[in-house]
Amino acid sequence: MAGKALQGVRVLELGSLIGAPFCGTLMAEFGADVIKVEDPEVGDMSRHLGQAVDGTGLMFASLGRNKRCVTLDLRRPEGQAVLARLAATCDVVIENFRPGTLAAWNLDYATLSKDHPRLVMAHVSGFGQTGPYRDRLAFDRIATAFSGQDFITGFPENPPTRPGGALADYITGMFCTIGVLVALHHRDHVSGRGQEIDLALYEGILRLAGSIEAFDLLGTVPQRMGNANPAIAPAETFRSRDGHWLSINGGTDNVWKRLLALMGREDLAVDARFATARARATHQAEVNAIVGAWTAGLDLEPLLDALERESVPAAKVNSIADVVADPHVQARGNVVRAVLASGREFLTSGVVPKLSETPGSIEFVAPALGAHTDVVLRELLGMSDADIGALRRERIV
């Protein structure tokens, strides 16, 4: 992977499922040598969850891209010894075991960094390495509930709703990547030493919440509002005459005036209820009702054409079938073709973001369990075939 931005960075990934492994995926897409360590018997659970094709779990087909996969039984001293040697060859270790697990195996940062002070270690766990809840288990839906996200998601007449997709997991992976890159920069340009990164699964969503300040200063507790936005109107999901859904955001004053002209309702520009962004937010039920009545009188395509012509932000509410067929998505490389181990081609998400000089890429997807064990142990640790064979007979690898 010559010419990649992270070429020369080696990452040891001890993570499972999404939160920590997504950090490894992002780094691997941009050229880092990511070595994924899995249990010899079952591997990462992402291999076994959700749908599968030709024996390959499709979740792992996305998360396992560009990674070299090694099996190692970390619950046994022999496996721990091999892991410590591998860590000594790496810049970064990413892990999402329960807090204290690595310390019990003598694989914690304090131990590994004694002989490798440049090592960066990122910890992802449900509630972090410190605090009264550090020993609690959590998955994505626990994190979205704890962070307050579920409380504000959904319609007021319905129970709190979990956001679609593994939102907390993927956001955590992104924040973990930021932390690793910041730590590497500090090591290489400031201190010469590595450091630890501590990230709880709920913290990324909480950081993005944007509601703490208003609660503290004004006592505001956001409630479920469906698809509306408490600070912006019109900002809703509307229905067209032919039964399609579209989203419109006309919250700024300039966009609102253009939308009024398009609807033939310039008279509302001088109505005190709608004259400013803050006033419209206060009267958003009325604003959204006016816009909704207008969209209900037109079919989707003429609606979208008119909104685009007048520079009013809008989009059809797409299904995944709509997304992959969209010419803009295709032109941007947001979906690309890859190949499973069976030889079957399939569509997968493209690399994000796009770099002009050192773009990321998908070199391969979903290696078999332990596919790179022998080559990694030979290349990085100088092990012989006899050494590796002995580990395999003892089911260490």
Image (tube, rainbow, N blue to C red):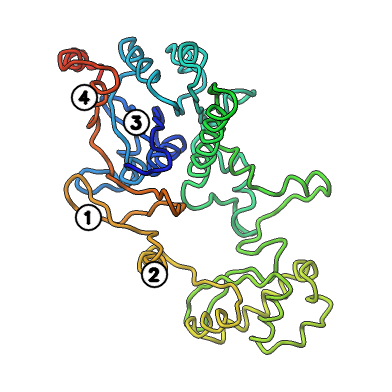
Q: What residue type is labelled 4?
A: Asp
- Camera-near label (3 vs 4) is 4
Q: What residue type is labelled 1?
A: Glu
If you read the primary sequence from the N terminus, does the residue marked by circle 2 or circle 3 appear first?
3
Q: Mark 2 points at which residue?
A: 326
| 388 left or right of 66 in image | left
Q: State how far apart marks 4 and 1 are (Cα).
A: 27 Å
Q: Is mark 2 on a helix, strand or loop?
A: loop
If you read the primary sequence from the N terminus, does the residue marked by circle 1 or circle 2 appear first?
2
Q: Which amino acid does label 2 sit on?
A: Asp
Query: Which of the 4 quarters of the picture holds residue 348?
Result: bottom left
Give the residue at x 56% y 51%.
Answer: 161
In the rendered image, residue 63, in percent from the top left (x then y), is placed at 36, 42
Vertical position of residue 79 compared to residue 132: above or below = above
If you read the primary sequence from the N terminus, does the residue marked by circle 4 or circle 1 appear first?
1
Q: Residue 235 carries which label?
A: none
Q: State how far apart marks 1 and 2 are (Cα).
A: 19 Å
Q: Name the residue under label 4.
A: 374
User: Where the N terminus falls, by quadrant?
Assistant: top left
